[in-house]
Image (cartoon, rainbow, N blue to C red):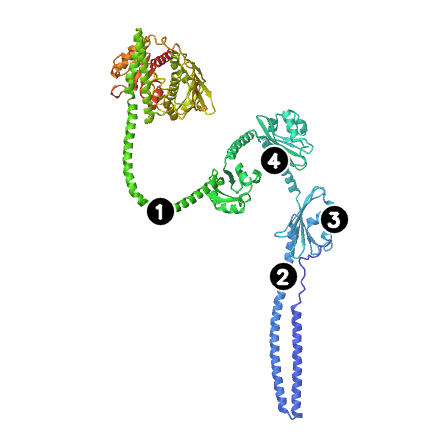
Amino acid sequence: MKPTSSPLTPEVAVESPEIAGEDELERLRYENEKLQKINRVLMRRVEMGWGNHSDAYQSFEDAAMLADKVKERTYRLQQTLHRLEESNQQLELARRETEKSQIQAEQDRQRLRDAIESISDAFALFDADRKMVMVNSRCAEFWQQHNITYELGKTSFQEITAASLVLVDHKAKAQKKVGVYPDPIAQTIFKLRDGTWIQMQERKTNDNCLVVVYTDITNIKLAEEVRYETAMAEQAELLKATLENMSQGVVLINADRQIETWNQRFFELLGLSDSGVQRGDVFAELMQQNVFAKALFDAISFDVAPDKDFLEVEMMLDENLVLLVRRNLIPGGGILITFADITERSRNQIALRESEQRIRLITDAMPALISYVNKDLCYEFVNREFEKWFNRSRDEIINHHLSDVLGHKEYQTLTIHIARAMLGQAVNFELEHSRDPDNVRISNKTYIPHFDEQRNVIGFFALEQDVTEQRRTARALKHAYDYMEQRVNQRTKKISEINLQLRNEIEERQLAEIKLLEAKREADQANESKSKFLAATSHDLLQPMNSARLFADALNDLILGEEAQKLIRSLSYSLENLESLISALVDISKLEAGLIEPVLDDFEIDDLITNMVNEFTPQAEGKGLRLRVKTTQTLVHSDTYLLARILRNLLSNAIRYTNEGSILIGVRRRKAGLQIQIFDTGIGIPQDKLSEIFHEFNRLDAKKRRHDKGLGLGLSIVERLASVMNHTINVRSVEGKGSCFSITLPYADKLAQRVKPTPAPLIDRFNDQLEGARILLIDNDDEICKGMETVLGSWNCNITSVQTLEELQEPEFLTELDPQLIIADYHLDDGDTGFDALEITHQHLDPHPPVIMITANYTNELRQMVREKGYSLLNKPVKPHKMKLALSNLLSNAKA
């Protein structure tokens, strides 16, 4: 079969230049001959006319004109001949160029054939009608090998394609794609029945011809398959390693509900055994190994929500393990299940929820509107008051924009303040707004920005307080002030006129007032001087009283005659009354001078009441009365010393005004505090006198009880001491049957309560502990020393007294004496105090013996100093019985 010429190189029909030049020359010659004939005829007619016609001149003119035309035509003929000659030359050049082009075209066509033949791919060229015009030898061999016939110039592209379809393996999916830029190329890859892979490329030429190239890519496809299998194997290994290193448990189940792959973490989290587990085992059977796995399988079973591609379940297997299970459906019917240990996250979530609940309890209890707005200007937190104000539920506010909740108008008003807060500025302002026209409110708003770790603003906190009433009150006050100022201005003029009249009278009254003020100042100075004098001289007043009481008590212990005993009893009674009077006057003066300040502390009320009972039992028994007590171990907050003074005065009054029966000290728990009550079966108090008994110098039945030399200051002192400590005093009484005085004390703070140490047992309050006790007395008053030596000597004590610090510093004095107890007076000579003397004893005695500090100074500073040093304190005048009880307690505790 002989191929025909290609349509890519069509032959061009070109007219020969020699033929064109000869025709033009012939035409010009013909025209020249024609003109010459016309010229001869005209000349002949002219010649004939001159002889036959009379108008010879006219004929001459015509002949002349004809000659000019002939001349002009001759000139044009010469130009035409000249142009004809140039055309012949150009035609000759064109002919030569055409011959060269034909030779070059033939060479190019041969090169194209050689190039197409040299490529390794099969090549075919089809013209614009898709008729085959050229193929290379490889393409021809391929078609001849598979018995496909073709003919150049006749066989079409569709025919050759249809004949080739029987060779294609239709089981292998063909791939086709079309490229648009830069040239339209269609590329198709398909597989032949013999396993060969062919890539067919189709491309149109500029003249709408079609070039088809067939390339054998079998080796490339095989190499790609090898690379794909290798990559898949590597990915499988990488996936397996990844699964084993994941903190989550993973299991992949195929469409037949069989296990495809898994990691070891899956077995560890569910407590399953991996022995004997193989790919293809039924997943449901594996999950029946224990209760936990079975429960998980029931929660994520394939029958649970089968229409959901994703299912998430959180389960607590035990208190130490919480799992998050996710079930994902994958294409093809498979299932991927992951198990994540979220125990710590669950605990943190529980802690966060509890913390949020506590915060919400606090914020919901606050009357202000509290909210938090994120950087997108959406609410993330609001309290209950916020919900009430906007009359919306929390779900209708959270995650909603400010403009949706506040309204567009109010939001526009707040825009500038919100912008400042989002720039990191704390903003405080007031705004008037309303939820309805009849309820206009004024709010004080505060915006506080919230920063992250990089100091970027991520939101702000909003606090809103309703200050409507405060502002209304302020406006009302301003209005009232303006109105009053107007009224004042109106009256000022009138008052000015009255002032002019009263000025003279005022000047006179000022003179009188100055005199009155001077008189009052002198009276106040006298009263203050009296109070300070009595308070300052209390030591000097009580010092001789203390020594007199000691000597009287020493005389009372001696065996004397009946007359002497009467005199001693009278002396003791007089001294007791005098002591009571002086103590009351000193207390009143100190209270008036403001020298008594409470030292509040927590203490056990049982200890104080027990001491009061021990102190007043002998006095009650001496009058034939029975002193009863009902107490409890409760901590109260008060001043121990001042409370003891109050109870002593109340017990003294109860014993004084009770002739027969009993006295009861009781304790009751009240909501307001612990109430101490003192009941007596005495003479009682009339109802109309209950408000007068606390007045100074007021006594009941003073005329009937002349033997009682009191001044009526005891209850006045009680009321003033209770007022100093902010305690409440109450009294109720039935005349002729008895009275009840009560004082209410605040409870101690429970956080301040502490375990009370068990006190050492009290062994014989009297002589057993005092027998042979070595006691050191430090006092600068010789009479006091003699009185103390006499009294303590009557109790079989070995007492040694010193009056100066120099005596204490004598060599070996303290070590040889080795006292078991020290009694020290606070005021010594030359400005020295008992603390200075005790410092000396500390230097020589180890361990240091217990100390009793005796003083007439009632200041809180001294009491605090004595308490800090661990000493006992007795105020002058000292009652011998109280002294004896204190000595016995300290000595017994020291021996214990």
Residue 605 percent coordinates (x, y) = 42, 19
Between tags 2 and 3, which lies in front? 3
Direction from residue 166 to residue 471 in the image, left or right: left
Q: Nearer the viewer, residue 707 or 41?
A: 707
Tell whether label 3 touches label 2 (CB within 8 Å).
no
Q: Is mark 3 on a helix, strand or loop?
A: helix
Question: On the rendered image, what quadrant is the C terminus found in?
Answer: top left
Residue kind at label 1, given as amino acid type: Lys
Between tags 1 and 3, which lies in front? 1
- Whole-angstrom CA distance, mark 4 to mark 3, is 43 Å
Residue at 49% across, 37% down:
368
Tell whether label 3 touches label 1 (CB within 8 Å).
no
Residue kind at label 2, given as amino acid type: Ser
710 is higher (above) or lower (below) than 208: above
Ranked by sequence position, the earlier of labels 2 and 3 is 2
Q: Which of 166 and 773 is in front in this view?
A: 773
Q: Residues within 10 Å of mark 2 (few under 14, many from 20)?
A: few
Circle on res. 235? 4
Between tags 1 and 4, which lies in front? 1
Q: Is mark 4 on a helix, strand or loop?
A: helix
- Whole-angstrom CA distance, mark 2 to mark 4, is 63 Å
Q: Residues within 10 Å of mark 3 (few under 14, many from 20)?
A: some
Q: Which of 856 and 655 is in front in this view?
A: 655
Ranked by sequence position, the earlier of labels 1 and 4 is 4
- Whole-angstrom CA distance, mark 2 to mark 3, is 40 Å
Ranked by sequence position, the earlier of labels 2 and 1 is 2
Q: Tell me where residue 321 sits by quadrant.
A: top right
Residue that carries the numbered disc 3 in the rendered image: 163
- Whole-angstrom CA distance, mark 1 to mark 4, is 108 Å
Residue that carries the numbered disc 1 in the rendered image: 494
